[in-house]
Image (cartoon, helix red, strand yellow):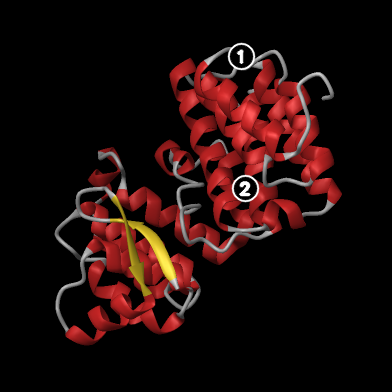
Amino acid sequence: MEYQVLNHNNAVCTVTDADIEEAAKSGEPLPRAIVLGMGKTHDEKYLEYMYPVLYHEVNYMRLDAAQGIINLNGRKGLEALKEKERSIDPSAFDEFPSEKAVLMAMIIRIEEGPEGILRYFRSEEGLDIVKYCLLSYYSSGYDYKEEDIRLISVMLSEFVDKKLKRVKKVTREDWIEFVYFALDSLWVAALETEILAQMTDEASQELVDVFREILEYKATNDIKELMADISKSMKRDYALEVLRNLKGKTGGGNARSAYKKALKHFNITDEEL
C-alpha cells in the first residue's frame, strides 16, 4: 500500500509498505515520513519502532510517535505513553503545542474511552490546556469509529451552546480555533474512512444538528468550507440537509467552491436543493 504523509520539511510525500519495511530493517534512525507511514499501516509489529521516537530530540517527531502508537494499538502502547508523560515536567504545560497535555488526552482516551474524555471536558476541574487537547489524537491514520464521531459532535454542541462556565469565557478567536480543529478531525475521518456513510441515522442527525448550531454562531468561511467538504462523505439525505443549511451562506471564495463541488458530487443543483 501507499501512504500520504509529511516529511521533515512538512511537505506531503508518499511512502509504501516496501519503504517502511526497508527502513525498519536498516537499523538507521527513522525519518519522519516512515514514522508517520508506520502509524498508518495499523500493523502492531511497528509499535516497537515508535517507543524510542517518543524521546526524539525534535518535538514533532515525539508527537508523531505518540500518534503512531494510538493509531496502531493505544492499549498495548499505554505504559510507554504514561512513562513518557510522567517524564515531562509540569512546566511543559505552558509550551505550545503542549506535548504533556496531548499525552494526557491520549491516556484518558485509551483508559476511559469517549466517556472519560467527555467527563474531563465537562468538569470544572482539570487543566484547560488538557481540555483544549482532548481531540488532538484524531489525526491522519486514526481508526475512527461511530463513537468517535458522536464524541466530536457532542463536544462541539456543548462548546457552541456555551453553558459550561469555562466555555463562556473563551474569546471569539479561541471559539473559532476549537470548532475549526474539531471539524478538521471530522474531515480527516471523511477523507480516510467510510465511517460517516456507515453511521446510524441518529449519529448522522447529531452531526447535521451540530453543524446547524455552528452556523447560527456566525461561522467563518473556513468552517463553512469544511462543512461542505465533510458532507460529501455523509449519507445523501443528511448531506443534503447540511447543504440546505449552507445554502445562501457561503459567500465567495473557498467556501462557495466547496459548496458547489458538494452539489456536483450529489448531482443536484442549487435550485433543486
- Which quadrant, please, contains the C terminus? top right
Q: Could you give the CA–CA distance between mark 2 and mark 1, rounded to whole angstroms?
A: 28 Å
Which amino acid type is marked by label 1? Lys
Q: Nearer the viewer, residue 272 or 97?
A: 272
Q: Secondary structure at mark 2?
A: helix
Q: Residues within 10 Å of mark 1 (few under 14, many from 20)?
A: few
Residue at image location 31% in from the left, 73% down from the top: 50
Residue 13 falls in which quadrant of the image?
bottom left
Visible in this render: residue 91? yes
Circle 2 residue:
119
**Residue 117's spot in the image, x, y percent?**
58, 51
Circle 1 residue:
218
Q: Secondary structure at mark 1?
A: loop
Q: Is residue 88 left or right of residue 272?
A: left
Residue at image location 26% in from the left, 48% down from the top: 10
Q: Nearer the viewer, residue 166 or 74?
A: 74
Residue at image location 31% in from the left, 76% down from the top: 20
243 w.r.t. 30: above or below: above
